[in-house]
Amino acid sequence: MQWIILIGDETFNINSIHRIKHFGENTVSSIENNRFVVDYGKEHIFYEFSESLINDYEFEELQKIPFQSPNFIMMIYKSKELMKKVLSQDNFIKGIYIDDDHGLIMPIEEYIETFSSER
């Protein structure tokens, strides 16, 4: 499994993602209050909200995040193509940041543009 971290302001939470219609989904199942899974048949995407993720960030990394009180949601996936497809949906949340867990923290729009140019 791979993951990225979705970063938003203090209003960004697991319900922000849960409300999105994930195109092509079979089912959406809550696992716990702060975690749910979107089932695509052979593929799944897990979302997990964690208040403690901020503790994993160095000061320099936090400086790249423009939110005063950021919230973090891990997006755990197996298929990078499916992850890209979901983030590119017209109804996916705008104005958030992505941490690709490889040192890049950038606005979602730049992240989508970066992997779109990889083709």
Image (cartoon, helix red, strand yellow):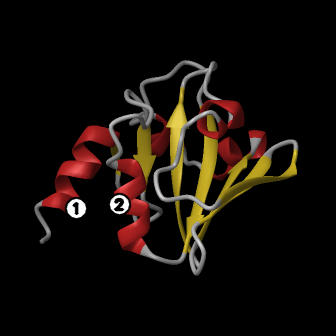
The C terminus: image quadrant: bottom left
Numbered disc 1: secondary structure: helix
Numbered disc 2: secondary structure: helix
Q: In whole angstroms, how far apart are the C-alphas of marks 2 and 1?
A: 8 Å
Going 32% across and 48% down the picture, which residue do you hit?
88
* 6 sits to left or right of 118: right
Residue named by callout 1 = 115
Kind of residue indicated by mark 2: Lys
Work out whether 25 lies above or below 58.
below
**Residue 20: which numbered mark, if any?**
none
Q: Is residue 107 visible?
A: no
Dividing the picture into quadrants, the one containing residue 25 is bottom right
Dividing the picture into quadrants, the one containing residue 31 is bottom right
* 97 sits to left or right of 38: left
Residue 91 percent location from the top left of the image:
40, 34
Q: Is residue 66 visible?
A: yes
* 31 sits to left or right of 76: right
Q: Nearer the viewer, residue 44 or 59?
A: 44
Going 76% across and 39% down the picture, which residue do you hit?
51
Kind of residue indicated by mark 1: Phe
Residue 98 percent location from the top left of the image:
42, 47
Mark 1, residues whose alpha carbon is within 10 Å: few (<14), some, or many (≥20)?
Answer: few
**Residue 84: which numbered mark, if any?**
2
Residue 66 percent location from the top left of the image:
42, 25
